[in-house]
Image: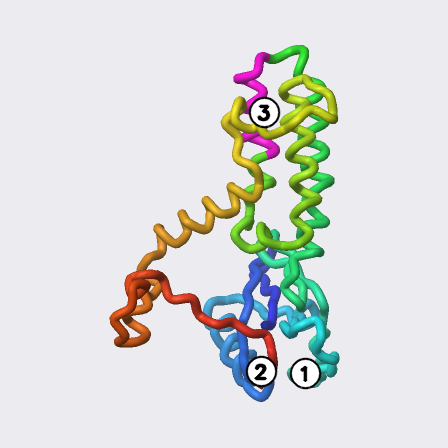
Amino acid sequence: MIAINSCRPPNHIFRTCIVLYDKQKTNLALTRLNRWFYINQLVLNITKTNVIRFTPKTTAHVPLDIYYKDNVIDEVKSIKFLGMHIDNHVIWKNHVEQIPPKLSAACFLIRKLIHTLNLDILCMVYFAYFYLVLQYGIIFWGNSTHAHQVFKLQKRVVRVMSDVGPRSSHRSLFRKLNILPIACWYMLSLVLFIVDNQKDFLANAYVHSLDTRNKNHLYLAVVSLSSK
């Protein structure tokens, strides 16, 4: 995957990414992209162009050494694209680490308001501030092993809103406030995404002709980062 910054004078900056499966096609892709930019009065900023290769953690790192017009394209282990910090192993550790400071700020704000606003207004503050940070891109990072850091802060803010101690059970508080825990919100987001994009998913019956009980279930494609 190559992430590219492009700009149009004087102040407009755009991010573009190209997904490639063959290193040998990199120069061809960049040449075509550069031509498209030129036609649309854009400029390819090659000095801010990076490449990231997705591999399993167990795969030994081999430098890509990609050049374009005598410029070296830097290979990075993590890159920010549309607010998402994407790492080369797709474990979302870097992205999840960016979330707690924002949620802590939201929690601090709500703590300051608990003696001023009623519970209904506090819930509005939660969904306007805390929830917006929590839900962004959750279908990508919600299943990460590092997501428990975010859940700890979600439990904290629920206890703060309910004005209870830090050791109080959080399960009844989530139900009382009509707030979904992060794991439940992750699953709901996935379901809603599939419902909204059904045309992009296949049923088992379209993959094989066997008359099985699961023929109408969604086909789960096997995904691997291993190099062929």
Residue 137: where, in percent of width, then height? Answer: 55, 50
Q: How is the image coloured?
A: rainbow
At x 67%, y 70%, the residue is 50
| 48 or 213, nearer to the observer | 213
Quadrant containing the C terminus in the rendered view: bottom right
At x 60%, y 68%, the residue is 4
Total numbered badges shown on the rendered structure: 3
State which region is magenta. Answer: 118-130
Q: Is residue 200 above or below residue 55?
A: above
Is label 2 in contact with label 3 (beta carbons under 8 Å)? Answer: no
The kind of residue on which mark 1 rests is Ile
Magenta: main secondary structure: helix
Is label 1 in contact with label 3 (beta carbons under 8 Å)? Answer: no
Residue 88: where, in percent of width, then height? Answer: 67, 68
| 158 or 136, nearer to the observer | 158
Magenta region includes residue 128: yes
| 228 or 66, nearer to the observer | 228
At x 68%, y 67%, the residue is 48
Query: Disc 2 on helix, strand or loop?
Result: helix
For residue 39, the mark is none
- Dividing the picture into quadrants, the one containing residue 163 is top right
For residue 173, the mark is 3
Residue found farthest to the front: 213
